Image (cartoon, rainbow, N blue to C red):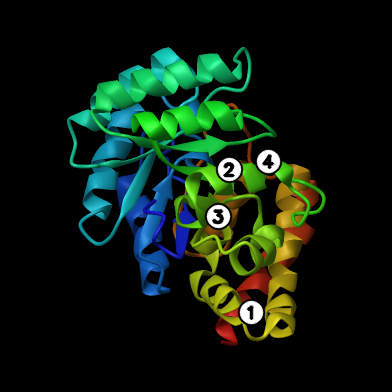
Amino acid sequence: MAPTEAIAADIPVALNADLSVNAHETLALARHVRLGGIGSLVVAGNANLQSMSLSQFEAIVELAETAAAAGPVTIGLGPELGRMLDQAGIVGKSALRSVLVLPIIAPADTHGTADGIRHIAHRLGHGVMVDLMRDNHLRPVTLRKLVDEGAVTAVRYRNSVANPGDDYYLERVLEIMGPACVVSDAGEGALYDHLHVRGMASTSSGIAALTPRLLRRIVGLMPTQPDAAAALMAPVLELMRIRAMLGPVQVLHDAVTEAGIAAMGPQMPMVSRVKDKYRLPFTAAIRTLLKAEAAL
């Protein structure tokens, strides 16, 4: 996503019964998000791109290009280097220019990850956004080198800590990048600290795929009416709790279908659908979330 966009929806991708990409239903989800006032889309982790074949990835790039006619779209690459280089070759032939690198966590180290990012940026011919998924995923000195070289232009911060207000790694990342070039993605519970306290300009959110107007309202209220924002956040946090318990990718994928927004079809292995024994709290959380959006 462009870091200047206040909110981006990190959307799943719909699949047909044979696991081919269903562009029609995915674009229906994109229209829902944009009708809710969020113009920027991310097709990356929530789309389970890590498990997609290159032929599936080509189809996703094609539908992302179609969606980009109506607003910004960021495409994810990952997680292994060889795969990312092949994916970068596909993206390089498209009109997409906003790329999010989802680097593998193991086996990898900070210097090796940095070299991989350099290879990807060189293959694309421009700098990329990088997911920082754990503490010191890229050490600050290494991140600064990548920024100075032009290989990294922005980061998406996914490192989740118990107290978002006490996050030394984020402080160093913000010193290097500046708040305008750091996208919050550590969960909706961190939004107040990230956007209002630290001044980060943007966030990417899976919840925005379900209730874009609600998330916009929450973010809009944070600076002047934090208590009202917190009250609206309650159903968001409940679905986040369920995503943490059952899996963020599978819950969001099935939630889009459950909400009647788009028919997302089967899950892409290596994850599975939400099990029947969890359907009651899963459905209740979605209904509460949709009711909060409808009340706006």
Residue 77 can be seen in this image: no
**Which amino acid, by three-letter code, is at mark 4?**
Tyr
Q: Earlier in the sequence, mark 1 or mark 3?
A: 3
Residue 116 can be seen in this image: yes
Which residue position is annotated with label 4?
Answer: 169
Which residue position is annotated with label 1?
Answer: 291
- Quadrant where the C terminus lies? bottom right
Q: Are marks 4 and 1 in contact (CB under 8 Å)?
A: no
Q: CA distance from mark 1 to mark 3?
A: 18 Å
Which residue position is annotated with label 2?
Answer: 173
Secondary structure at badge 2 equals helix
* Residue under the point 36% across and 53% down: 2
Q: Quadrant of residue 111?
A: top right
**Which amino acid, by three-letter code, is at mark 2?**
Val
Q: CA distance from mark 2 to mark 4?
A: 6 Å
Q: Is residue 56 above or below residue 259?
A: above
Q: CA distance from mark 2 to mark 1?
A: 37 Å
Q: Nearer the viewer, mark 4 or mark 1?
A: 4
* Residue under the point 44% across and 18% down: 116
Give the camera-side residue of 48 and 221: 221
Please state if 140 lies on the left or on the right of 34 as rendered: right
Q: Earlier in the sequence, mark 2 or mark 1?
A: 2
